[in-house]
Image: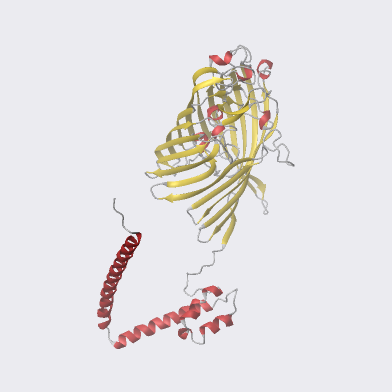
Amino acid sequence: MYFIPKDWILEFRVLNLTKQVRASLFAIFIVLSFLNTITFAQEEKETLNQRLDRLEKQNEELSKALKERLSITPSSSSKEDVDNLLLKNPAETPVKNVLALPAMGVDAVPGTSKNPAPMKVSFKNGFWAESEDKNFTFNFGPMMQFDNGWYSVPENVNSTMDNPLTDGSALRRFRLNAIGTVLKQFEYRMEVDFSGATDFRTTTADPQAPLFLTDAWVAMNEIPFVGTVRIGHQKEFLTFANGTSDRYYPFMERPLVFDAFEDGNQFNNGVTLSNSYFDKKLHIWTGLFRTGTRTGAFGVGGGRTAFDQRISYFPILNLEEQHWWVLQAHGTERSLPLVSTSDGQTQFFKAPQVQFFNRPLVRTGSGFQVPRIISTPTLFSQDGETAFGLGTQTAYGRWTFGAEYVATQIYNAYLNTVPGYVSSNGRDAQSIGNQYYDGFYVQGLCFLTPGDHRSVNPSNPGFTRISPVRPFQWRRTDDGAVTRGPGAWEVKFRYDYSNIQNPFFTQAFIPTKISGGNYQAYTFGINWYTNTNMAVMADYNYNYRDAGKSVGSGSFSSFGMRTQFEF
């Protein structure tokens, strides 16, 4: 083996670098000489008088521009200070003095000021501020949904759930939202839900967390070939139902398939990529998330992740003619979140687990008081979950129809606990194999008022805000006339089916409240959108519960009303 002294190598690199520098300088000299030759040749064509006339004209233009800029007195310096810098004749001002003008609040050249553009403030679906050049925007607004509900439930159904269905009211959602852009390309959003607070005097979870962090993310838009990259606590946009904001959803609650299979993963920490193609007719959304971070921005546990994919295609997309049709497919492969589990004695351990359940479509009381109509026992699995779905939505004028199917599978599931541990009820882990659950919904909507319709967001398929053609008005003006407007009126229907049934759940030691089963619901209702920001909803539900056992099955009905405003 041969060795070359280090100082030889260093000398060689320096020598080689020197040669490169010399070559670069020589190339630059050749280019400059060529350009100078061209310029000199052109100038030779001009006579001396022509050159003097051209220079005098340029001098006059520069003097005029400086005088125009001096007509506005700088806020940070006096007019005299600027005059001293420019002397008596602006045309004779030294270059160094002209360069000092921007520091005094004056533009040396019009349009080159580094001072920030002033913000315009207005009210446009909330407090709105934006710079004149639209590089910076900021929107702040609240959202409130106040519900009342009534139930008619037989005793054999009500007594076999974890909580009874009870007439009452609920502050369903109360959120504060801030969203904006920076330099047009960067976007941010922060939203917090206060509706879970059982006592606004404390932040202690008693028994549920008083604050629910929904959105806390930043994004970079319009990246070539990529589209949008978003990082932070955000939605997992798997279905059309979840793609529609709570502000714009036409029913008091999303469908049962969302509640059973998607609500537990509605928000999580992650990074997403999304983009639209072919004039927004094709939209692709991809996400990588950390499971178990739904209600906050904190999460621990190595490798507990989810990979999501949603593809949306619009065979018809004509928003001006109020006619659109979208087809969707989604899939997700996810690890079950780690949850602290007890063996019933002194030992606690983290175990990957999940529980599927459905709540009523009209809800009263705090979240922990809302019963689960059907529910599985806690399922344990080290092998994770796979879910997929198909859906379609279409609108033509006042009519809107849609349907979605969602299914999920848990691999190598166990009851009671994970292998190697004893559960709190003293039972060993019981293998129940792969578990498959599914459900679907179909819905129809129709506006009764002429011209009103439902639109869609092609960049993230879901319903958008309703803006009544004739907002509700019924008041007397100063001149004595009475103004009238009906608002927008919409009737609606939806059928829901959710299936989480399994023969293993009928074992004697499993109580009816967690024995699985299936749940069907027929919803009829009407929506009144008084204006762009306020609405009243009324939903009637006829429900049938199959508890999976001979006891606890039966039908019941519910009626709910919602008053909401959002900006």
Q: Does any portion of residue 45 appear in the rendered image?
A: no
| Residue at the spot 53% in from the left edge and 31% down from the top edge | 262
Q: Is residue 354 left or right of residue 147?
A: left
Q: In this view, does 498 lie above or below 231?
A: above
| Residue situated in front as seen by the camera: 508 or 80 | 508
Q: Quadrant of residue 414?
A: top right
Q: Is residue 424 above or below residue 220?
A: above
Q: In this view, does 557 lie to the left or right of 54?
A: right
Image spot of residue 161 (x, y percent):
65, 20
Image spot of residue 76 (x, y percent):
60, 74
| Residue situated in front as seen by the camera: 300 or 481 | 300
| Residue at the spot 24% in from the left edge and 79% down from the top edge | 41
Q: Does any portion of residue 233 appear in the rendered image?
A: yes
| Residue situated in front as seen by the camera: 363 or 427 | 427
Q: In this view, does 131 lie above or below 199?
A: below
| Residue at the spot 73% in from the left edge and 38% down from the top edge | 199
Image spot of residue 416 (x, y percent):
59, 20
| Residue at the spot 52% in from the left edge and 21% down from the top edge | 413
Image spot of residue 274 (x, y percent):
44, 43
Label tally: 0
Residue furthest right as drawn: 201
| Residue situated in front as seen by the camera: 422 or 151 | 422
Coloration of the structure image? secondary structure
